[in-house]
Image (cartoon, helix red, strand yellow):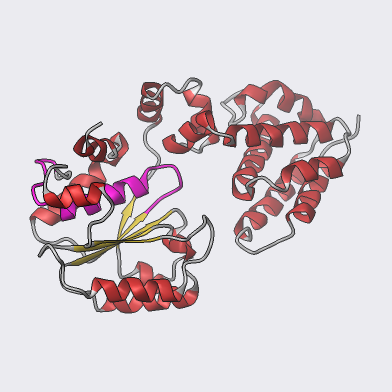
Amino acid sequence: MAYSESIASSLYPWQVSQWQKIQSQLSADKLPHALLLSGKEGLGKRAFAEALAHSLLCQQPTDNGTACGACAACQLLAAHTHPDLLLLQAEEAGKALKVDEVRELSSRLQFTSQFGGYKVALVVDAHDMNINAANSLLKTLEEPAQRSVLILVSSRAEKLPITVRSRCQRILFNEPDEALAVDWLRQQGVEDSAQLLRLAHGAPLLAQQLKNGELYEQHQQLIKSLLALAANQPLLAQAELLHKLPLAYLLNWLYDWVEDLIKLHQCGEQGTLVHETYRRELSQLVPRSSLPALYEYLEQLLKQKQLQSIPLNSQLLWEDLLLSWTRQLKRV
């Protein structure tokens, strides 16, 4: 695939309105100096940010604003050597972005563009900045360098200080219409797209990742562990299986599982479940559980989701969560 085609294809069909809005601002010479691309994981925010950065740096953008792929700037972008594109991201996913890294980025933004156009800085997972890093970035936001654009990408924008958020124009990415997402997934060769999309909470790229990677196997392990405990299997063995898996995903799916059980309590067989393929197993758990206890468990899970950024002993955490699960169920 040619470079220009690669950039154009990185714009997903559910990103059209956001792209058009920014291109309109650019055409009117009213592009903000700082943008915050926010929305849940799996909506292609980073791909959008990269396409926008390339658009700003391209010397001959196409009619729809995407990079041409042929000019000298685009060739440097393809080689990841363009001097006016700066990238800041943690060395490992979930690690903090530190103040020294932000200071270096801010300092480099002050340099004159080597191509005489924009200087663009892309901050991936901006919510991972520690407080000192965020405060350092605030200075850059308050006194931006001329012809500079700062693009922050975040799936947890609420973690950013309000002082940072208020100085950026927020570009929100919502889950696309289900029909559009399912159609796109089918075009990518993803079977069971509707079911995977439910597990991904409407995020098409996460649904695609579920199909193609080990994430789906991790989901399956969670369900196997929950059902094993319902069959009175030893708890510690199941906690040992789960504690090394990615906590955020498993907490979301455990929350969905409990919500599905509540839905069956309240609505019987009406409506679609997130775990539709496990409807029979869930239905068998209805007479063994009670609504008040399930709602209490949801509260526990919600609190844990809010605290997941705090380092915890994951083995003990899962022992506690699974113990609470077994307490939901009458023994058989």
Residue 325 against residue 111 in the figure, above or below: above
Q: Is 290 left, or right, of 202 in this rendering?
A: right
Is 86 covered by the magenta stretch? Answer: no
Q: Is 41 left, or right, of 318 in this rendering?
A: left
- Furthest residue toward right: 332
The quadrant the N terminus occupies is: top left
Name which residue lies at 38% across and 26% down.
Answer: 179
Residue 193: give x, y in percent of width and height. Answer: 47, 24
Residue 40: give x, y in percent of width and height. Answer: 45, 48
Residue in the foreground of this view, choosing between 306 and 50: 50
Name which residue lies at 17% across and 55% down.
Answer: 57
Q: Is 59 left, or right, of 299 in this rendering?
A: left
Q: Is 96 left, or right, of 122 in this rendering?
A: right
Name which residue lies at 68% across and 39% down.
Answer: 258
The quadrant the C terminus occupies is: top right
Q: Is residue 203 visible?
A: no
Residue in the foreground of this view, choosing between 163 and 113: 113
Residue 168: give x, y in percent of width and height. Answer: 30, 65
| Number of marks | 0
Q: Can residue 1 be seen in this view?
A: yes
Residue 121 against residue 262 in the figure, above or below: below
Residue in the foreground of this view, choosing between 202 and 103: 103
Residue in the foreground of this view, choosing between 322 and 205: 205
Quarter where residue 260 is shown? top right
Q: What stretch is highlighted in magenta?
A: 38-64
Residue 7: give x, y in percent of width and height. Answer: 24, 41
